Image: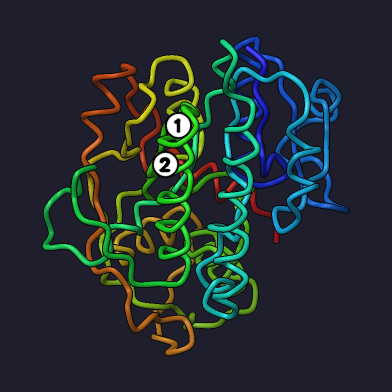
C-alpha cells in the first residue's frame, strides 16, 4: 500500500512511519517548509521515505504535496500543543480546521470517473468530548470541546466529513486518547515531568512545579497508537469514527509517583497556576471496543513499560 503521512516530521508521525515501513508499505512523508524527517527514524529509515514539504495554510502547497497516486493518506499535521493553541487560537483553527478542509477538498477532487481516490485517516483527539461524568467516552457521545485545540479539531472533523458526503471521499476518523513515549517533546505533560524530576535530582531541589495532578487520563503508548492507525487503514470502515484508548484511567499524581520510583527522585509537587488550565478535563478515559471489533487491536505496552522507555530515551 502507498501511504502518504502528513506530519511525518513529528513524534507520532515518526513512529507511524516506522510501523508502516516495517509492515512493508511505501511511505511518502510530508513535513513543514524547512522541516526535517522525524528524529524518531534512523538514517536508514529516513532514506526509505519519499519526503515532501507542505504548508496547510496554502491551498496550492497542499495540492502539490498530495500529487501522485496514494492508496491512503494519514493526516497528522496540526498545531498539536494545547498551550500553543491557547496562545493563538486563530492559528490553531487556520491550521487544524481550515488546513484539514483544504486537504480533504484536494483529496475529494480525486474521486470520480470510476476512481475511488485514496482513503483519508483523519486523526482528531479525544479532547473533542470535553468534560464528562466519569464514564468511558464512546464515539456517539456529544462533542463539547472546552479548549481552542479541541475546538479546532472538532471543526476539522466537521470539515472532512462534509467533503466526504459531498464528493464520496472515503474518510475514517480516529480519536486517540493521551499518548506518550520515547522522543516526545517536553511541551507535553509526562515528558515535562520526567525532565523536571531529572533536573531536581541533579540540582538537589526538593520541589518541582506542576499543573493539576488530580485529572484522570487514559494513557497509551505511541507505538500502540501507531499500530491502531495501521489497523484502521487495513480494516477500518469509511464513514466511521474510532476511539483509540485502553479503557483504564490514571491520575497524573499516580504517574508522577511511578516516575519518581523509576528515576530515584523524591520531590514535592507545587501547583503552578501557569501550568494549570481553568477548563482542564477532569476525567478522560475511552471505550475502544469498536476499534477492537473492527481491527483486533489491543494495547501491547503497559504504562510502566512506556514510562521506563520514555525515561531511558530522555537525556539530561
Q: Position of residue 154 (x, y in %)?
A: 40, 57
Q: CA distance from mark 1 to mark 2?
A: 7 Å
Relative vertical location of residue 131 with respect to residue 276 in this rendering, above or below: above
- Left or right of 90? Residue 225 is left
The N terminus is located in which quarter?
A: top right
Crowding at dot 2, Cα within 10 Å, few <14 / some 14-19 / many 20+, comes out as many
Q: Position of residue 168 (x, y in %)?
A: 46, 27
Mark sitting earlier along the chain (1/2): 2
Q: Which residue is mark 1?
A: 171
Q: Position of residue 89 (x, y in %)?
A: 54, 75
- Residue at figure coordinates x 67%, y 44% from the top left: 7
Relative vertical location of residue 100 with respect to residue 119 in this rendering, above or below: below
Marks 1 & 2, CB-CB < 8 Å contact:
yes
- Residue at figure coordinates x 61%, y 17% from the top left: 71
- Left or right of 128? Residue 17 is right
- Is 33 in front, or is 207? 33
Please tell me in which quadrant of the rendered image residue 150 appears.
bottom left
**Furthest-bottom residue in view?**
273
- Left or right of 291? Residue 151 is right
Please tell me in which quadrant of the rendered image residue 5 appears.
top right
Q: Which residue is mark 2?
A: 161
Crowding at dot 1, Cα within 10 Å, few <14 / some 14-19 / many 20+, comes out as many
Amino acid at each position: 500500500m502507498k501511504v502518504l503521512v502528513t506530519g511525518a516530521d513529528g513524534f507520532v508521525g515518526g513512529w507511524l512511519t516506522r510501523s508502516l515501513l516495517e509492515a512493508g508499505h511505501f511511505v511518502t512523508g510530508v513535513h513543514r517548509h524547512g522541516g526535517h524527517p522525524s528524529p524518531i527514524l534512523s538514517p536508514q529509515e529516513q532514506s526509505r521515505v519519499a519526503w515532501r514539504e507542505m504548508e496547510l495554510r496554502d491551498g496550492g502547497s497542499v495540492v502539490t504535496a498530495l500529487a501522485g497516486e496514494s492508496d491512503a493518506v494519514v493526516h497528522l499535521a496540526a498545531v498539536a500543543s494545547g498551550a500553543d493553541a491557547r496562545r493563538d487560537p486563530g492559528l490553531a483553527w487556520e491550521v487544524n480546521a481550515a488546513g484539514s478542509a483544504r486537504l480533504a477538498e484536494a483529496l475529494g477532487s480525486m474521486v470520480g470517473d470510476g476512481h475511488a481516490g485514496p482513503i483519508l485517516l483523519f486523526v482528531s483527539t479525544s479532547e473533542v468530548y470535553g468534560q464528562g461524568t466519569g464514564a468511558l467516552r464512546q464515539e456517539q457521545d456529544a462533542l463539547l470541546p472546552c479548549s481552542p485545540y479541541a475546538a479546532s479539531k472538532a471543526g476539522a472533523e466537521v470539515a472532512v466529513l462534509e467533503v466526504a458526503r459531498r464528493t464520496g471521499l472515503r474518510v475514517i476518523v480516529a480519536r486517540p486518547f493521551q499518548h506518550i513515549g520515547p522522543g516526545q517533546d517536553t511541551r507535553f505533560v509526562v515528558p515535562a515531568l520526567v525532565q523536571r524530576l531529572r533536573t531536581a535530582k541533579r540540582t538537589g531541589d526538593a520541589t518541582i512545579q506542576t499543573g493539576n495532578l488530580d485529572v484522570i487520563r487514559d494513557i497509551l503508548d505511541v507505538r500502540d497508537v501507531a499500530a491502531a492507525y495501521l489497523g484502521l487503514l487495513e480494516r477500518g470502515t469509511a464513514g466511521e469514527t474510532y476511539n483509540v484508548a485502553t479503557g483504564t484511567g490514571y491520575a497524573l499524581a499516580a504517574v508522577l509517583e511511578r516516575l519518581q520510583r523509576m528515576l530515584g527522585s523524591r520531590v514535592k509537587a507545587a501547583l503552578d497556576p501557569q501550568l494549570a488550565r481553568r477548563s482542564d478535563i477532569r476525567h478522560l478515559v475511552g471505550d475502544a471496543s469498536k476499534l477492537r471489533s473492527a481491527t483486533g487491536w489491543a494495547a501491547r505496552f503497559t504504562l510502566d513499560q512506556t514510562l521506563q522507555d520514555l525515561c531511558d530515551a530522555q537525556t539530561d
